[in-house]
Amino acid sequence: MFFWKTWKALKAAGVMGINRRNADYVLKYNKRHLYPVVDDKIITKERAIAAGIHVPEMYGVIDTEKDIDRFEKIVAPYRDFVIKPAQGAGGDGIMVIGDRFEGRYKTVGGKIVSEEEIGHHISSILSGLYSLGGHRDRVLIEYRVKPDPIFKSISYEGVPDIRIIVLMGYPVMAMLRLPTRQSGGKANLHQGAIGVGVDLTTGITLKGTWLNNKISKHPDTTNPVDGVQLPDWDGFMRLATSCFELAGLGYIGVDLVLDQEQGPLILELNARPGLNIQIANDAGLTHRCHMVERHIAELAKEGKVENVEERMAFSQKHFGKPIPVAAEEPEMHKQTAP
């Protein structure tokens, strides 16, 4: 009986469970043949570059074991760079080089690695060790993002990122993900990073969630994570909104970063974005998604289709203030009742 009452309260508050996400949004709006556009970071980046959308610069791609010999030539002009699997997930397989040292390389964590060790790591990526489904993969070598100084007091090492859920080109919810000591400097909530809600209208951070518990301070820096104004918020919103045209998928999570020199950049796209973002915002996704669907239906009756600026304005007008949800269920993202 308690479970049923809890679920009824969550449903009334518009909290989306994984079954609803999959049936009503992922399967409905994301055509399977378009998945490679978001599941392969190299394809995503190439499309973004062609469309003039800002992404971290791509230094090179390694496709085969034979191509590993090209590594030194690719990175020769750079002291720092990132090596990542094209089809990786959750940050696995990513190696971040922060500098060179005596003919070797130094990771941002301070570990000294040889070119031979990097070669072994690249070989592991190619074999599919970190890829979705264990399939053979490609290696992407790209620009290393330098986090904007604004994050220094509320993040532990690593690169904070911003996840924005976009439905049919309309942003519906946003979250700032902050690395912690427990997450190993990665902005991955399942590994212990913090998720902080973001007001879609202003770009000001709200309360956070850490290991499914609501928090107001970063566990490592002890500084408040709420009330922080994210710079160039309209820039983030514009980039996320434009990803509908970029990917062709109707329901996606857009991951962005704020580089201290280049500003907002798109890091990657996700066709199956998680639901923890609702906890971070203390708000449900369902009501917002329904509002977007009704709006699109009304536009269709008039034969209208909105552009990026119009879609962005709609979202900032209607989704600026979070809709409170019931507090009884801290793990709402695991809820699977119909």
Image (spheres, helix red, strand yellow):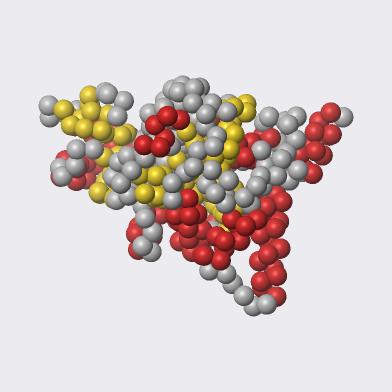
Q: Position of residue 32 (x, y in %)?
A: 54, 56
Residue 34 seen in the current view:
no
Quarter of the image containing the N terminus? top right
Residue 57 is situated, as x and y percent measured from the top left of the image, at 29, 50
Q: Residue furthest right?
A: 1
From the viewer's perspective, tell me whether residue 46 is left or right of residue 311.
left
Estimate the x, y position of residue 255 in percent, counting from the top left. 47, 46
Residue 122 versus residue 164 in the image, above or below: above
User: What is the quadrant of residue 167 in the picture?
Assistant: bottom right
Q: In terms of depth relative to the viewer, which is nearer, 88 or 103?
A: 103
* Residue at x 41%, y 44% (from the top left corner): 257
Residue 180 visible in the snapshot: yes
Q: Is residue 156 left or right of residue 95?
A: right
Q: Residue at x 29, y 50 (%)?
A: 58
Residue 322 at x, y percent in the picture: 66, 45
| Rendered-image quadrant of the C terminus | top right
Q: Is residue 337 left or right of residue 36?
A: right
> Who is closer to the viewer here, 309 or 24?
309
Hey, which residue is sitting farthest left in the picture? 102
Note whether 305 is above or below 144 in the view shown: below
281 displayed left or right of 203: right
Residue at image position (12%, 29%) is 103
